[in-house]
Amino acid sequence: MPYRDVNLQIDLFTTEFADTPKLPSCVQYWPALLSKPLATEAYLRLVEEVIWRQPEVTVFGKTHLIPRLQSWMADQNVEYGYSDHQLVADQWHPEVIALKRLVETTTGFAFNSVLLNYYRDGDDKMGWHADDERELGSNPAVATLSLGAERDFQIRHNTSNQTHSIALGHGSLLLMKPGMQASYKHQLPTRKKVNAGRISLTFRYVY
């Protein structure tokens, strides 16, 4: 979709960059990578057109459905899994390819896959974890593009337990730089007052 790439590229040069002082130095945040109209258009299209699944995972010996919907897109022969669950890759959606190119241009990192999480409302969540699976290498960079309802994103240091929190807005981009996954965990907690949906696109490179 060439027209999509043109629109996104224009928006790249009009957005404001913010290196948020409340967050660790291993994190960078762009509060408005996409304009609200572009972000809304992308959100609505992905909700309708992506194949959403709710897989089971096993944690501490117990198997349960994850509290969100999910989709995995990746280049050919790229495999990835977590918590004893192997993800099944769908074909790249044209909208996601365009967003990937924008994220790569903005961050300077190349990505060959994306994990999309669809939080249907404030009851859907992601618990404390690190993106430190072996397939991601020793020092991965992970970029998260947020579409839809604003949700709190929390980061906790492994040793000091110091916790940082930031509200990820509609059309924002958060980059977790190499080294962060070894020192911090992160989560998206429940927020009972949120009654709208949010999609996160977490771009990563799988070896």
Image (spheres, helix red, strand yellow):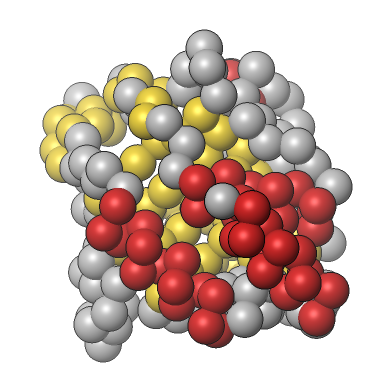
Pinpoint residue 175: horizontal percent, then vertical percent.
71, 56
Pick the residue in front: 173 or 98: 98
Q: Residue at x 63, y 30 (%)?
A: 112
Q: Determine whether, in the image, residue 69 is placed left or right of residue 100.
A: left
Query: Residue 197, image x and y in percent?
Result: 30, 72
Q: Tell me if 203 is positioned left or right of 118 in this view.
A: right
Residue 23 showing in the rendered view:
no
Determine whether 144 is above or below 51 in the image.
Answer: below
Return the x and y of residue 169 as percentages of the image width and height: 54, 79
Residue 59 is situated, as x and y percent measured from the top left of the image, at 27, 32
Compared with 204, 159 (above or below) is below
Total numbered badges shown on the rendered structure:
0
Q: Which residue: 37% across, 52% down? A: 117
Give residue 140's quadrant in the image: top right
Q: Please indicate whether residue 96 sits to the left or right of residue 181 in the image.
A: left
Quarter residue 53 falls in: top left
| Farthest bottom residue in view | 193
What residue appears at the point 50 percent right and 53 percent down from the top-left corner?
95
The answer to which of 158 and 6 lies nearer the viewer is: 6
Residue sitting at 64 percent across and 53 percent down? 2
Asked whether residue 55 appears in the rendered view, the answer is yes
